[in-house]
Amino acid sequence: MAAFRSRFVRALFIFAGTLSVALGVLGIFLPLVPTTPFLLLAAYCYTRSSPRLLEGLLTSRWFGAYIRNYREGRGIPMREKVLTLSLLWLTIAASTLFVLDSWPLRLLLLAIAAGVTIHVVRVKTFRPEREA
């Protein structure tokens, strides 16, 4: 039974990681869908389930350096921080003003946005010229 549970949990992590990569890719093309959180979630899921898929993600031509820089504590480029926070607050503002009628939900969204903002601002800013 433990072996089944282990395989089942591993399969769930692989599924969640793959879904996260797909959503992260969509985020590249759809401005309201975030890319970074989904890619970091995928890296976490693959860390727990598949070294091969994690290696593929970390060596990816499009995502590899970005994820490695974040995971290794080098930070996020300033352009990405500004873009992330701009889109975050744009979508939160649109949602709270035009979509939601419930004040508790509006406050929850604003609190989440504030938490994400604090996190992104506190993450070190990656400067490639200093790394060379």
Image: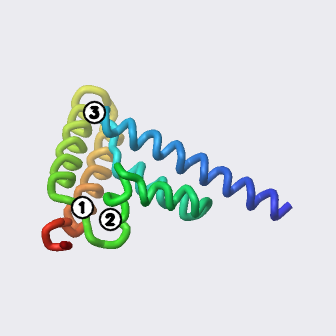
- Please, is residue 122 above or below residue 78 in the view? below
In the rendered structure, which amino acid carries the disc numbered 1?
Answer: Ile
Question: Residue drawn at (27%, 35%), measured in percent from left and top?
Answer: 31
In the rendered structure, which amino acid carries the disc numbered 3?
Answer: Ser
**What residue is disc 3 on?**
95
Residue 65 shown left or right of residue 22 in the figure? left
Disc 1 crowd rating (10 Å Cα; few below 14, some 14-19, many 20+) is many
Q: Position of residue 66 (x, y in %)?
A: 31, 58
Q: Dots 2 and 1: beta carbons under 8 Å?
A: yes
Q: Dots 3 and 2: beta carbons under 8 Å?
A: no
Q: Quadrant of the C terminus?
A: bottom left
Q: CA distance from mark 3 to mark 1?
A: 26 Å
| Badge 2 or badge 1: first in the primary sequence | 2
Question: Residue drawn at (56%, 48%), measured in percent from left and top?
Answer: 16
Q: Dots 3 and 1: beta carbons under 8 Å?
A: no
Colour mode of the rendering: rainbow
**What residue is disc 2 on?**
70
